[in-house]
Image (cartoon, rainbow, N blue to C red):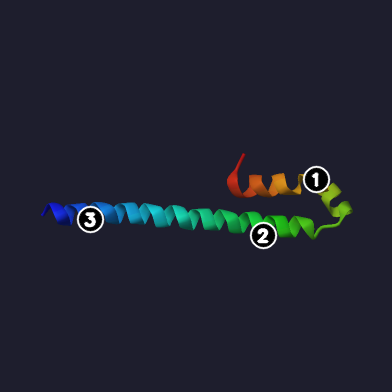
């Protein structure tokens, strides 16, 4: 019985691991998409948004990972 409980406990660890991995991949996707879209904008469009080109990476990080 102890072996069954031990294996079951490990299942929860694997579940948490894959849930965390899935979340990390989803955040990375948001970061890359935001970065790609902001880099495609012209200087005028960025200015209209109040973003300087040097701020693009930080804005993308905040969008994906928060402040």
> In front: mark 2 or mark 1?
1
> In front: mark 2 or mark 3?
3
- Position of residue 35 measured from the top left corner of the image (x, y, whole percent): 71, 55
Of the numbered discs 3 and 1, the one sitting upstream in the chain is 3
Of residues 39 and 46, the one drawn nearer to the viewer in this rendering: 39
Q: Which residue is mark 3?
A: 8
Asked whether residue 51 is in view, the answer is no
Is residue 35 placed above or below 55 in the rendered structure? below
Q: Which residue is mark 2?
A: 33
Quadrant position of the N terminus in the picture: bottom left
Q: Give me the C-alpha separation between circle 2 and circle 1.
A: 17 Å
User: Residue placed at 53% from the left, 58% from the top?
Assistant: 25
Asked if the residue at tag 3 contacts the one at tag 2, i.e. Cβ–Cβ closer than 8 Å, the answer is: no
Of residues 7 and 16, the one drawn nearer to the viewer in this rendering: 7
Tell me the crowding category of disc 3: few under 14, some 14 to 19, or many 20 or more residues within 10 angstroms, Cα based: few
Of the numbered discs 2 and 1, the one sitting upstream in the chain is 2
């Amino acid at each position: 019985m102890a072996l069954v409980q031990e294996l079951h406990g490990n299942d929860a660890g694997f579940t948490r691991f894959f849930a965390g991995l899935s979340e990390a991949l989803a955040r990375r996707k948001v970061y890359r998409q935001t970065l790609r879209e902001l880099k495609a904008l012209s200087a005028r469009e960025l200015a209209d948004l109040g973003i300087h080109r040097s701020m693009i990476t930080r804005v993308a990080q905040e969008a994906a990972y928060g402040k």
